[in-house]
Amino acid sequence: MESKEHNQGNLKLLREQLDSGRMRAARVMINSLHPAEIGHLLESLPRRDRALVWEIIDHELEGDVLVEVAEAVRDDLIRGMPHEELIAAVDGMELDDLADLLADLPETVTQAVVESLDALDQERLQQVLRYDEDSAGGLMNIDIVTVRSDVTLDVVSRYLRARGHIPDGTDAIFVVDRQNHYIGTVFLSRLLTTDPNALVSSVMSTDVKPIPARTSSHEVVWEFEHRDLLSAPVVDRNGIVVGRITVDDVLDEIRDEAERSLMSAAGLDQEDDMFAPVVPSALRRAIWLGVNLMTAFVAASVVDLFQSSIDKIVLLAVLMPVVPSMGGVAGTQSLTIITRAIALKQIDRSNAHGILQKELAVGLLNGILWATVVALATYLWFDNWRLGGVIAAAMVINLFVAAFAGFSIPLILKKINIDPALAGGVVLTTVTDVIGYAAFLGLGALFLL
């Protein structure tokens, strides 16, 4: 809470300084912040103010700030930077951060940056770029410390002192053989508290299992969450240590996944800039509005089939929105539960049937409960018990179908490689609208005419 209030206070103060023309004070304030805080402030500013602030950021901070901002904001900032300034901004960056940034740089800048690296760093950079950004290899940091199992802890301590530094966030060093295959992990706490004459092999832990470089980022998050890891070695297909993942990398991935799910539910990209120009923003959002419009026409065509019934019994039109609305809410509850279960890998063939039975039972029970309430309310409102019975039956049918749809839609979408968070809501709404209208109007035509 204090951090959020601090960021809001910085944003308010910065805007006041910009509005009053106090650029010197703004420069001092902005350059005293952490690059992540600067990135947050840039994303929170309109494009005109953002350009002003970017001009007063110290050049040695620019590369670190570019890594922290959303892709759309980064592209906007990069477009306004001379190539020489871009090359200077990324000079000296950590190789894993540089790998994240290279794809957004102009080709001439990328070539110049790569050529400025020594042969070893070029090889290490290519090693990072070899892996997909949403994999363990894409998340890893290649700056690691490795030792052999047949040396003493005193030798390891002297080796670390000779290095002069260890990578940030290091809580353990990895034990490898002569071919660099992973054997185990030595935690720094054991290194500092154990007899210096003890061999590494006697204090190393083999409980920390390496993560294959091709492992998806979702599985990496799962591993850290369920194994309470602070760091983990990353190995290639031959078991050779190629890097490490630390908990701060995983926290970033968790945040990105949460933003991706939230934005995907509305058919948006989590990297969208909220201050982007109106026309591009409208075009991006128009796609899913168009999809929703087509599904709305499907539901409308079902209503049109019963137009004559609606003309004869106007009360059907009054109550018509109730059934699909209740089905939509019930279906969304099931959809959310199953989508979460898929993300956490809690559902498979062994338990899917049991989960389906439970969701159908919940849908049926809620259908009966609220059908009774709606039937009673309809009878008291319109003094028509047959109308109450029709809407009650339609509601039971729609909530039961909604539970089945909420269960099956995410699984089907996942099977065909479509993100359930992106398309699930649109498909579910179509199903509950069509079934809701068809059940209510169909039963009305059958029993009320």
Image (tube, rainbow, N blue to C red):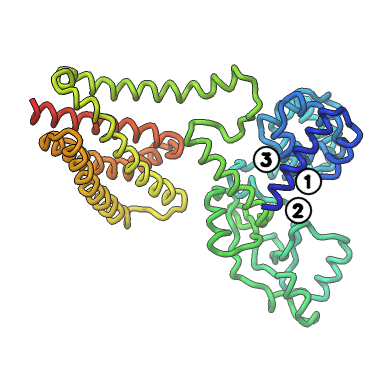
Q: Which residue is mark 3?
A: 129
Q: Is residue 414 above or below residue 218?
A: above
Q: Quadrant of residue 280?
A: top right
The residue drawn where x is 81% and y is 25% is: 81
Q: Earlier in the sequence, mark 2 or mark 3?
A: 3
Q: Earlier in the sequence, mark 3 or mark 1?
A: 1
- Lateral position of residue 130 relative to residue 422, left or right: right
Secondary structure type for disc 1: loop
Residue contact between numbered discs 2 and 3, judged by CB atoms under 8 Å: no
- Lateral position of residue 368 relative to residue 131, left or right: left
- Residue 398 horizontal/vertical position (percent): 24, 39
Residue type, numbered disc 2: Asp
Mark 3–mark 1 distance (CA, rounded to whole Å): 13 Å
Q: Which residue is mark 1?
A: 94
Using the image as rendered, state which of residue 149 and residue 78 is in the foreground. 78
Mark 2–mark 3 distance (CA, rounded to whole Å): 15 Å
- Lateral position of residue 190 relative to residue 257, left or right: right
Residue type, numbered disc 3: Leu
Q: Quadrant of residue 241?
A: bottom right
Mark 1–mark 2 distance (CA, rounded to whole Å): 9 Å
Q: Earlier in the sequence, mark 1 or mark 2?
A: 1
Q: Which residue is mark 2?
A: 143
Q: Is residue 27 above or below residue 172?
A: above
